[in-house]
Image (tube, grey):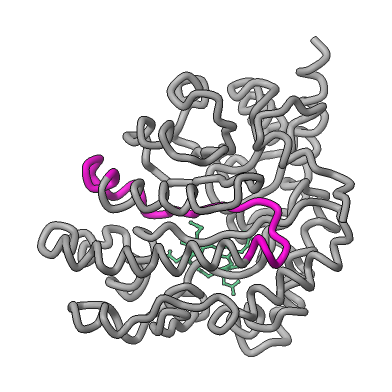
Amino acid sequence: MMLKNDLILRAARGEQTERTPVWLMRQAGRILPEYRALRALLSGFKELVETPELAAEVTIQPIDALDVDAAIIFSDILVVPEAMGLTYEMVEARGPLFPETVKSAADVARLRVADPEEHLGYVLEALRVTKRALNGRVPLIGFAGAPWTILAYMVEGHGSKTFSKARRMLFQEPELAHALLRKITDTTIAYLRAQVEAGANMLQVFDSWAGILNPQHYHTFSASYIAEICAAMPADVPVTVFAKGAYFAHEDFARLPCRTIGLDWNEDPRKVRPLVGDKTLQGNLDPCALYGSPDQVRAATIEMLERFGPQRHIANLGHGVYPDTDPDRVRVFIDTVKEHSLRMRQD
Ligand code: 1CP
């Protein structure tokens, strides 16, 4: 299947593009009325994630509604711990909850390295259905959580500001942490490779809790495993690593065998560029900028584009779009990227 729009793939590979590609983290979800309408008919989040036709439908909604340059498969990073044997619940308006957590070597021993077709077949089927329905309109992004971020949920059991149980394990029982990270990494490598076979054109690794580690721990317990994952991917599939808050880890980023580094809104791309070689950068508008007036959104977007420069940039927010954002402001953001990035190439 020939892609009609491959801007994001070319930008990720570092090739020249005629304008800057744009998509939004969490573009499929509660910002869209068509998502909320479908969601209201269902028992919950998991039904949506586990029904391939429905997951495909909400994956494509932002392509129709927002005209973004990529689709990201509708799923969650927490399907991986579940496939390994640790079931999650998605508590309405609160977030994920693991009734059982990992506390001991026996707990780690009980977990399996998941088989993608057997334990995550519903995600792979959603990718196949989405791919067919997209009919080459835009590339499809597959994703997984970084092993450290997955460990954080498996040990803590739910979201947390500090994830102090998980960080405590790194200090008290580093060997146990490594044993768990090993199993998560092996599962994730097989899972992401299977996503590519099922139709993903590029991949993103979300290390949402990178920023709470000290630099040594980040290097040892997170970046090293992400590097292994990137190295195990097919050479023609660009990988983006988004490690939120890891402004201390630019040297680790530079060495990662991935094409693109995602930046959150605390980072200045002008400072990061010279530190990461020829990698492409993704990001990084503050999601709160979208609460401004249309003129304010336009101005903030233009300022962001100028900081990144015209090439080797994939425009996005610095984290997921907040659910109460007005889709019309999102459209202003997207249209401004398209118009202004053309203009940047003319003068
Ligand atoms: O019913 C709902 O609408 C629940 C909200 C929701 C949604 C829409 C959750 C619960 N997950 C998702 C989908 C999701 N999760 C996507 C979909 C594709 C997209 O449009 O982008 C993606 C990429 C994720 C990835 C994800 N899940 C991350 C990494 C990215 C990030 O935001 O940092 C994390 C940390 C999660 C865990 C998770 N799932 C859901 C929530 C509320 C959370 C965060 C919990 C916490 O604060 O710790």
Residue 201 located within the stretch drawn in magenta:
yes
Q: Is residue 131 above or below residue 211?
A: below
Q: Residue furthest bottom?
A: 43
User: Residue 147, percent across and down?
Assistant: 38, 60
Query: Does the image show residue 152?
Result: no
| Residue 193 x/y as whole percent | 58, 62
Quadrant of res 312: top right
Q: Residue at x 85, y 58 (%)?
A: 64
Q: Quadrant of the N terminus?
A: bottom right
Q: Residue at x 59, y 32 (%)?
A: 280
- Is 83 in front, or is 272? 83
Using residue 254 as the reference point, say whether residue 175 is left or right of it: left
Q: In the rendered structure, does residue 218 fall within the stretch colored magenta?
A: yes
Residue in the picture at 63% in, 42% down: 316
Image location of residue 324, percent across then percent down:
62, 59
Residue farthest along the top direction in this orientation? 347
**Whole-percent x, y for residue 17 in the image:** 77, 28
Q: What segment carries the magenta color?
A: 195-219
* Left or right of 324, for residue 163: left
Q: Nearer the viewer, residue 115 or 80?
A: 115
The residue shown at (63%, 59%) is 142
Relative to 31, 79 lies left or right: left
Q: Image quadrant of residue 255? A: top left
- Tell which of 44 and 299 is nearer to you: 44
Q: Is residue 262 left or right of residue 325?
A: left
Quadrant location, the C terminus: top right
